[in-house]
Amino acid sequence: MSGTLIDFCKQLEPTALKLPASLLQAARDGVEFQHHFPTTREEPWKYTRLGRVAALKLTPVKINQSAERLAASETIDIIFEQETWHCAEPTAGLHINFSADLDASAWNACTLQGHVQHINALSAQGGVAIRVDANTKLIKPLRIIHRLQGAHTGLILHHQLILGNHASAQVEVFFEGTSEDSYANVLFDFFIGAGANLHTDMLQQTKGTHYGFHTQRIYQQKDSTVALQTLTAHTHFTRNEVEVFSQEEGTHTQLYGAFIGRENNHIDNHTYVHHTAPNCTSDENYKGVLADKATGVFNGKVKVYQDAQKINAYQSNKNILLSDLATINAKPELEIYADDVKCSHGSTTGQLDQHALFFLRARGISETKATDMLIKGFMAEIVGAVKSSHIQEALHALLD
Amino acid sequence: MVELIALNKAEIKYSTVQNWYPGDKEGKGGVFNFVTKRGLCEAHAKISWTQVETGSAVTWKYPSCILKGDYSVGEFFSVAVTNNFQQADTGTKMVHLGKHTKSTIISKGISAGHSQNSYRGLVQIQKQAAHARNFSQCDSLLMGSVSGAHTFPSIECKNASAQIEHEATTSKIGEDQLFYCQQRGISEEKAISLIVNGYCKEVLNQLPMEFAVEAQKLLSISLEGSVG
Amino acid sequence: MLKITDLHASINGTEILKGLNLEIKAGEIHAIMGPNGAGKSTLASVLAGKEDYEVTSGAITFEDQDLLEMSIEERAREGVFLAFQYPVEIPGVSNVNFLKTAMNEIREHKGMPALSAKDFLRLVKEKSALVDLDASLASRAVNEGFSGGEKKRNEIFQMAMLEPKLAVLDETDSGLDIDALRIVAGGVNTLKSANNATLVITHYQRLLDHIIPDFVHVLYDGKIVKTGGKELALELEEKGYDWIKSVE
C-alpha cells in the first residue's frame, strides 16, 4: 500500500468528497501529478522546496469513527487520535457530521488555488462537517484536535464549518503529536453567513519530521466578522495557505499569525485576501522568530478588485532573526484596482533590540532570560489576540 | 542598457527623466521601454539611481545595485506617473554582499485613467553581509476608479544582524487636501498638480536643479485631464 | 454682503440645517454659538461649498451673486474665506508655494497681475508678524508637523494674505491656549475693516472676549433660535445651552 504522494493520490481518487465534476476536473488538471510538482521557479513556491515531499513513502491513514461520545467538558471536543474520530455530544443548534455529509451547495463558492488545494480536492479521505444554525451563538468553544502519530503516514482531510446568518462560534484547532516522515494536508472551508462572527485560533506544533500542509479558506457574507490566528511552533515543515474571500459588503477580517522556528524548521505562511465587495476591512499581522538554521517565509497578498471601494486593508509582517544561519523571505504584496481605498503594508526584519537587552541585563537579568522576555514582548500582540486559554497556555510554555 | 561600476570610495549619481511618447488617449501607439540598468559598488562606494518616469506606453525598468564592497551604499529614488492606458512596472534590486552596506528605496507611483502602475523590487541580504541596512518606502496614489496600483516587494534575509524596514501605502488623492486648496482659490487641476508634486518631493529633491523643474512640469502635463 | 434664506442642508440623507436665516452686512462681526451637533460646522462647510453636504432648499447670496452656483474655488476667489477647524496637512507642498499659487490665482481672477517674488516675500514677512508666526514655518510643508496653535495661526496668516471679504472662522478657538487665543483674535481684529465681515463660529464665549461681535446668534437643531447683542454670549455662558432648549 505504500508509495509516493503521487501514487497515494491516485490510489485515493476518486475523492471521498462529493466534489462537483467541474471542480474535480480543475483539480486534476491543476495537479497533473503524473509528472509535476511545483518547483522554486514557480512564484508561490519560490522559497519552499517540495523535493523531499515528493520523495516521501506514504501509507494512507485508515480513518475510523468512534460511536461513543466524548465526555462533556469546557469545550465541545472533536478529537482525531489513533486513526479514529471521537466526538462530543453537540449542543443545541450545532451539528457535527463526518465527510459524507459535506454540504454540496457550499462547494459552489469554492475555487481551487494551487498545488496544496488541488491535492486536497482530489484525494481528501474525509473530514468533519460542522454546521451552526442561524442565530445560534455557541457558548462553549469548539475544540478540534489532530493528534498525529506513526511514521510514513499520509493524511488528507477536508473540514467544513458553516456558520448560519448571525451565528457566532469560537473554534480552537490543534495539530500535535509526533510523526516521522509523514504527510498531512488538512483544509478548512469556513462559510460565514451574514452578520455571523467566527473566532478561530489554530496551533500547529507537531513534532518529528512531519510535512504539514494547511489551508484555511474563508468565505464571508455581508457584515460578517472573522478573526483567525495561525500559530506555528517548532514544526519541521509547515506550509500555511490562508485565503479570504470577502464576497459582500461590510466584512471585517483579522488574520494574525506567529511562526517560531528553530533547528532546521521550515515555516511558510501564504495569505491571500480578496476584496471583491466595497466597505470592508482587513487587518493582517504576522510575526516570526527564527533561530538556528530555521527558515521562515511570509507572502501576504491583498487584492482589491475594481469597484470594491472604501476598503481599508492593513498588513504587517515583522521578523526577528536570532542566528546568522536563519533565513527569512518576506513578500508583502498589494494589488489594487479600485481608487477609493486605504491600504498599507509594512515589513521589518532585524534582531532583538540590543538596548533593551542591555537594559534588562543591567538590571541583573540573565541574557537567556532577557532574550526570552523580549521575544515574549515581541509576540505579545499575537498571543493577546488568541482567545483559547489552551493555546494561550501552550504559547506561554513555548516562549518560556 | 546601462552599467555603472563605482570603485573604492567613488560615487555615481545617475538621474533619468523619461518622457517617451505614451500613446494616445485610447492607448494606441506609444513606446515600449524595456531597460536594463545595473550597478556595482566596491568598498565605500555609492550608487544613486534617480528616475522620473512619465512617458512610454509600457515601461519595465529595474535599476539595481550590487553592494559588493563593505560600507557601500545603494539608493533608488523613483517617481512613476501613468495615465490613460500606460503601464509602468518598475523598481529596483538591492543585493547586499558586503558588510555594513546600506540601501534606501523611495518609490512613488501615481496612477490615473486606465493605467496600471507597479512597484516590483528585491532586497537581498546575503549571509556574509553583516550589519546591512535597508529602508524602503513605496507609496501609491490613485486618481481614477479604473486605474491600478500594485506593490510587489521581495525581501530575502540570511543575516541576523541585518535591519530591514519596508513600508508601503496606497490611497486615493486626499479629498480634504483638494478642498483645502480649492477653498484658498486654487483650481482643481492646479491643486492636484500641487499635491502630487508635494507627494513626490522626497524624490524630486534628489534630482539636479534643471531636471527637477522639468520633472515638475512633466508631472503636471502627464496628469492633465485626469480629473473627474 | 451675505444673505442666507431658509437654508436646508443634509449629509448622507440626514438633515442638519433646517431652515436657517442669516444676513451679514459689510463691517459687521457675527458670532454663531450653539451646542455640539447643532449644525455650526455644517454651515461653515456649506458656505465654502464642501461637496459632502447637499443643499436641499433655500438660497445663499453673496455680494448679490448666487453662492450655491459657484464652485469651491470661485467662492474663495470672490472673497469667502474659511478658517478650518482642522486645517489640512499637505506633505511636500511648502506653505509659501501654496500661498503664492492661491494668491496669484485669486489675482488672475480679479484681472490683476501676478505678484513679484519680492513683493510677495515682503507681504509674507509683514503678515506673518501679525500672528506672531515664525518665518521658518512659511517654508515648511503646509501644516505638516505644526502644533495645534501653529495651525490656527497659519489659518489667520493665510487670511491676512488673501484679504477676503467674508471670513468664516470655524471653531478657531478650539485647542488654543490663552496666549494663542489672544494672538489669533488680535490678528482678526487688525484685519477688520468697514468693507469686510467676519462670521465667528464657536462653542464657547471666551473667544468673544477678544473678538467683540455686533450680533450673537444661537444655532440649535439646524435653526437660529435666538439673536442678540454681545451680552447674549455672556448669558449663554452663564446659563448653558439647556436654557435655550427649555426656552424653545
Image (cartoon, rainbow, N blue to C red):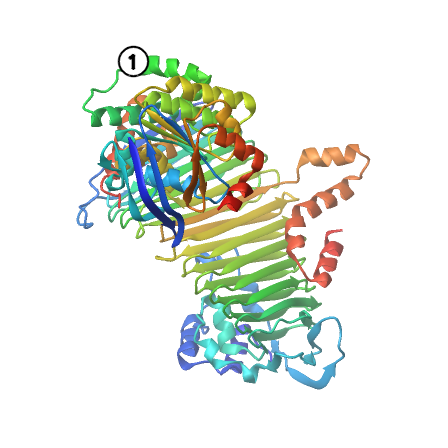
Number of numbered discs overlaid on the protein picture = 1
For the point 54% across and 41% down, the residue is C243
Compared to A92, does C75 lie above or below?
above
Foreground residue, C36 or A193? Answer: C36
Mark 1 lies on residue: C119
Q: Where A101 falls versus B150 (above or below)?
A: below
Among the 4 quarters of the image, the one containing residue B176: top left
Query: Where is residue A58 drawn, in percent x and y?
Result: 60, 75
Which amino acid lies under the numbered mark 1 shown in the image of this protein? Asp
Q: Is residue C129 left or right of residue B28?
A: right
Residue B221's x, y, as percent? 23, 35
Compared to C78, does B36 lie above or below? below
Q: Position of residue A178 (x, y in %)?
A: 71, 67
Farthest bottom residue?
A67
Q: Nearer the viewer, residue A67 or B62?
A: A67
Question: Chain letter of disc 1?
Answer: C
What residue is drawn where x is 78% and y is 43%?
A369
Image position, residue A336 (x, y; %):
39, 52
How many C-alpha atoms fall within 10 Å of the one at disc 1: few (<14), some, or many (≥20)? few
Q: Residue furthest right?
A: A364
Classify the position of the N terminus of chain B by image quarter: top left
Q: Residue at x 27, y 41 (%)?
A: C68
